[in-house]
Image (cartoon, rainbow, N blue to C red):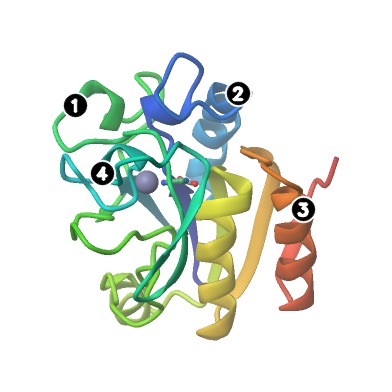
Amino acid sequence: MTEALIVVDVQNDFCPGGALAVPGGDEVVAPINAMMDRFDAVILTQDWHPAGHSSFASSHPGKNPFESIEMPYGTQVLWPDHCVQGTTGADFHADLRTDGDLIIRKGFRPDVDSYSGFFENDQATPTGLEGYLRSRGITALTLAGLATDFCVAYTALDAARLGFAVTVDLAACRAIDMDGSLAAALTHMESRGVKLQSRV
Ligand code: VGL
Ligand code: ZN
């Protein structure tokens, strides 16, 4: 079995002090760095939005961060401006090992958000990650990073649907947890056969 580690969005804006800080977000860095050498391949995802992205509340007059709107592809949570291409907020955490094999950027199309590393939120536009993994013969994935209930969960659910064996290492993830989103994401992942490791 060939197994990859997928490191999801360990970027400054998701760490304390960042624009969309995840509580304890920086605590994932040390465990992730320590895990990397155990895998056949290491892939990092990077949230990578153009200024004025449609997932930003600031792009919708009268809307506040964490409200939702209907987009052509479904309901979309509106976020504070974050991970704008080329900004410090979009950079990986300074202590994160970035000596992996591939960095996959997502969320760069102005009109559609992308939580998952595999498909954008329209559930149809691929990022190319599936093809990369398959052509390397990778069949099993372990996921870690930020945030458990958004980008990690969406990536895990897509991976499970695509037929990969998926483990989420919860000790190396942190959640946004708005309106019960963490509990919902954990239940959803378990129902789709995602293995939840080191559940706390
Ligand atoms: C994420 C909200 C918006 C994440 C990215 O990485 O979980 N969440 N963009
Ligand atoms: Zn984003």
Q: Are marks 1 and 4 in contact (CB under 8 Å)?
A: no
Q: What residue sits right under mark 1 in the picture?
A: 87
Alpha carbon separation for disc pair 3 and 2: 17 Å
- Say which amino acid is labelled 1: Thr
Tell me the element at label 2: helix
Spot the residue most to the top. Answer: 17
> In 3D space, how far apart are the residues under numbered discs 3 and 1 (Cα atoms)?
33 Å
Q: Which mark is residue 27?
A: 2
With 24 as the anchor, is 13 left or right in this view? left
Q: Position of residue 50 (x, y in %)?
A: 16, 45
How many residues crowd mark 4 within 10 Å: few (<14), some (14–19), many (20+)?
some
Label 3 neighbourhood size at 10 Å, few (<14), some (14-19), many (20+)? few
The answer for how far apart the CA atoms under marks 2 and 1 are is 22 Å
Left or right relative to 13: residue 101: left
All told, the count of numbered labels is 4
Q: Position of residue 118 (x, y in %)?
A: 38, 70
Q: In the rendered structure, which amino acid carries the disc numbered 4?
A: Ser
